[in-house]
Image (tube, rainbow, N blue to C red):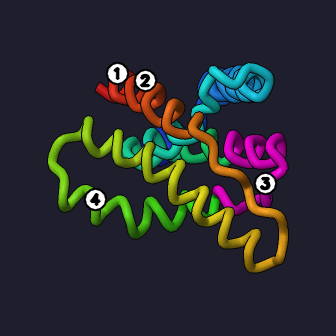
Amino acid sequence: MQTFSNMRRNSVDSRDIIRYGILLVALIFYEALSTIYYLMPPLFGFWFAVTALKKERHFVWLAVCYILFYEADHGLIIGSGCLFLYIYSRFALPAIEDLIISRAVITIVSIASAYLCYYALISLIYFIFGMNPVSFSWLFLYYIALESILATAALR
């Protein structure tokens, strides 16, 4: 009987699947709205910060799905955001966590570096393949500020 109870604790709850599925649909709807209304931040940096700092499996899958939809919706190279998320959370974030103690500052640095470093990565990939580069907009700074406030409040 002990074996069966252990198997039950490690199984996936159907309520979690429904809850995260509804959250994913709402996030995709929000991302589509943020494409239409430019003052709504796309929550790109927010998902980098949440995924990197929470380190929970459910958030990683939500972030991967959201980033793939974000890239497809904006005409970016599919999979480059997921590659960047992996490299960032594996190498850059531990170095940032060693330097900075405050969780709020780590969140803000994560969001700022997500936007700026991802822009640099996309520009590098476009340069290598001889494509027209993505133009830098001052809206990135607005998005960084707004998402930093949102993520700092959400991750308390």
Q: Is residue 59 left or right of residue 82?
A: left
Q: Answer with left or right where residue 149 lies relative to residue 31.
A: left
- Which residue is drawn at the image coordinates 64% and 28% (left, top)? 20
Find the magenta span and give its range. Answer: 65-81
In percent of width and height, residue 98 lies at: 19, 61
Label 2 SS: helix
For the residue marked with disc 3, what is the amino acid? Leu
Density class for disc 3 (Cα within 10 Å; few <14, some 14-19, many ≥20) is: some
Q: Amino acid at mark 4?
A: Ile
Going by the picture, which residue comes out furthest to the left?
101
Residue 123 appears in the picture as rendered: yes
Q: Closer to the N terminus: mark 1 or mark 4?
A: 4
Earlier residue among tags 4 and 3: 3
Q: Quadrant of residue 97?
A: bottom left
Camera-side mark, 4 or 3: 3
Disc 3: which residue? 76
Q: Observer-nearest residue: 100 or 138?
A: 138
Q: Amino acid at mark 2?
A: Leu
